[in-house]
Amino acid sequence: MTTVVLRQVPRTSPIHRLWAGTKLISVLLPSILLVVAPSWPTIGVIVALLVVTAIVARVPPTAIPRPPIWIWGLFVIGALINAPLGFDAILLFLRATTFAFVLLGASMMLGWTTSMSDIAPAVAVLGYPLKKMRLPVDEWAATVALCLRSLPLLIEEMRVMNAARRLRPKSVLNSAADNSIVDLVTATMSIAIRRATEMGEAITARGGTGQITAYPSRPGMADAIALVVVAACCALGIVLTVMLG
């Protein structure tokens, strides 16, 4: 099972060289379109856009996460539950499932082609107009950066905790006095509180969040072309939805 997330694929491609803010907007526009018009033509256009983007970015198939088999079993169970309601209900369930996978794929594409250190500066630049309203844009960007850096650490902690649970004797796990669920919840809360305390102390010792550091970058001509292509695909999805009704 592959559960690696938020890791950039080490490639050099036109998609990798785009500004991080352009990629954020390119994920936001199709997401809004899918929420407003979640039709099969729209989903098909966005899927085609993701496939072409993956090819241009040279993302290998091995980068796609492979969830455990029981997750696919849950989707099958969901389809069987909707089966008595008719074929339309099954199609609606499949469309909702595909909709979720498309949004997940767009988010993963952002992670595959973008360094996480570039996300916070891009958020700060995109939110610059909000600074005129005296909103804490820089603090929001710093919070995003901390969350992105903490997520892989949290995932690793969960893996270690799960591995420690597997080392417990089977007789204890299968006994009537087994409180493994309660133990897991308690351990998760303890890990989260401990890590939050350590991070808070580290930030305080360094004098606060400070400035957002990253290589300075701004959108260029390639970013404008990319946004035009994404906007054209969104418009095509809307036209196909209206025409095919």
Image (spheres, helix red, strand yellow):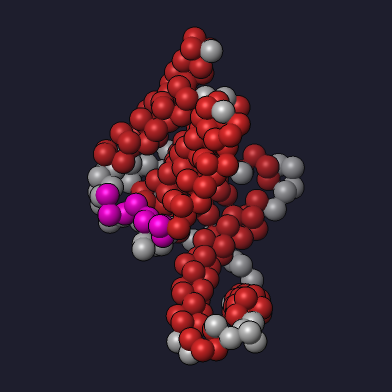
Quadrant including the N terminus: bottom left
Establish if 47 lies above or below 119.
above
User: Which residue sits furthest top?
Assistant: 243
Left or right: 2 in relation to 56: right
In the displayed structure, does residue 122 sit left or right of residue 66?
A: right
Q: Please tell me which residue is depicted at 37% across the width and 55% down the height of the picture.
A: 65
Image coords of residue 84 (percent x, y): 58, 34
Q: Which residues are magenta?
A: 61-69
The percent position of residue 225, horizontal first and vertical second, equals: 37, 28
Residue 189 picture location, percent across and down: 66, 76
Q: Is residue 216 above or below residue 152?
A: above
State yes or no: residue 67 in magenta: yes
What residue is rendered at 45% in x and 22% in y?
A: 41
Query: Which residue corresponds to the image point at 46% horizontal and 29% vertical from the top-left?
Result: 43
Q: Is residue 189 left or right of residue 8?
A: right
Magenta stretch: includes residue 186: no
Q: Please tell me in which quadrant of the rendered image residue 106 appears.
A: top left
55 and 147: which is toward the camera: 55
Quarter of the image where one finds residue 44: top left
Residue 150 shows in this picture: yes
At 61% from the left edge and 43% from the top edge, which residue is drawn?
A: 128
Task: Where is residue 2? Give x, y as percent.
Answer: 36, 62
